[in-house]
Image: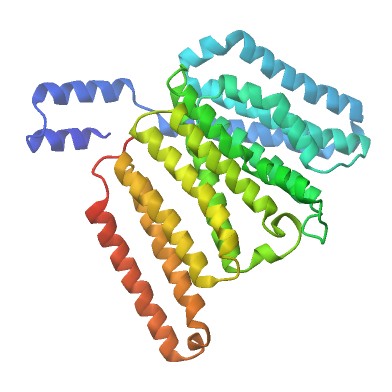
Amino acid sequence: MSARKIAEWHAAGLIDAATRDRLAAYEAEHARPLLLWAVWGIGALAIGLGVVSVVAANWEDIPGLVRLAVHLALIAALLGLLFMREAALAERSPWIVEALVFVTAAMGLTFFGHLGQVYQTSSPIWQPLGLWLALFAPLLLLTGRSWPSALAVIGGAGWTAWEYATYMTGYGAARDPGAAWLIWLGAVVALPAAFALLGGWMRARSARPDFWRRMEQLALAYAVALGSLACALASGGAFEGSGLFAGSTGILSCAVAIALTGIAHYAARPGTSGQMAATIITEAGLAIGMAVGANDSTVPAALLFFVLWAGIAVAALHAHWRGVFQMAVGVIALRLIILSFELAGDLLMNGLGLILAGVMILGVAWGAVRVSKRFAPRAEGEA
């Protein structure tokens, strides 16, 4: 907040002189020297790039075991620093701990690639990802404090799950692992959404509620992304192909797992916000299951997509999530525009079709803005 803004508020009669002085003193005490930080950042980046360049220039001359030992020693040093000084560093600045945790996890992930390079080994990517997740997810969950750590856990779990599922089904090749395996793989793909339960349960029971809120939000977003993806794939008839999307067994297994996660979330976090999050997760699971029935049908698949996001908008309205509500309205508007192009077909080859599509786009955009302004909640609560 700038001093000019504070002065303008005082001049407009919004705050009195005492409040103005307190605001000015607070801002002066908590001012962030962004230019100085930028200089420090540029200097640190230059040093880091220099070290990387020196190592890269002599990479082949350094014995593999030495490189691995140094890599492992750096990870051990960071872990030791976190173990001994986490509380003191967090008291000074939580972002220091967050940065150390994220860097440690990133170095752990790159270590497996480094190991494969030294020993010239190869394996399905889900195996090193799964091992990394097993070793470093506890560190991220026990010490993480914000988006980077939460995203590393959810992103790593999602990446591992999809790599495992696609590997077991032949990466899209005509390989059928059997109904039992498809049920298992569908549940594995849905597994990252289960972190919503952990996040919802822990955010009222931990000294790091912001981190667990991020975990819950990202897991919810993962479930919604799967539901939206299922509707999009159904519109193109993808469920008649081979691999993970062959037939309905794996899809229905994923749908049931996510729907059950949503139902369990009602107990994990009571209250309006928790109930609306549970409703959205449950809706996503139902949408995935119903997408199988709408396969290769443009309009029914699009209607299912609209129902999913309309449900998200209604839940956001009840929970006072202004940003989520506006995003839902925007997503529905974008899908309407895409649907207009899908249904236009040959009309798009002539001028009339382009005019109709343009009018449709303008109408949807205007309607989306009006709906968002009229119905969006005034204040956004915590998701």
The reply to whether residue 88 is in sight is yes
User: For residue 234, what is the image quadrant?
Assistant: bottom right
* Residue 89: x %, y % from top left: 53, 14
* Residue 356: x %, y % from top left: 38, 83
Which residue corresponds to the image point at 90% horizontal and 37% vertical from the top-left?
60
Q: Residue furthest left?
A: 13
**Total number of numbered labels?**
0
Residue 338 or 235: which is nearer the viewer? 235
Which residue corresponds to the image point at 47% horizontal and 91% vertical from the top-left?
350
**Colour scheme used in the picture?**
rainbow
Left or right, 61 with reference to 377? right
Q: Is residue 225 above or below residue 38?
A: below
User: For residue 292, what is the image quadrant?
Assistant: bottom right
User: For residue 17, what is the image quadrant?
Assistant: top left
* Residue 228: x %, y % from top left: 52, 55
The reply to whether residue 382 is in sight is no
Which residue corresponds to the image point at 39% horizontal and 39% vertical from the top-left?
276
Q: Is residue 328 above or below residue 108?
A: below
Which residue corresponds to the image point at 74% horizontal and 34% vertical from the top-left?
130
Residue 85 or 371: which is nearer the viewer? 371
Left or right, 252 with reference to 111? left
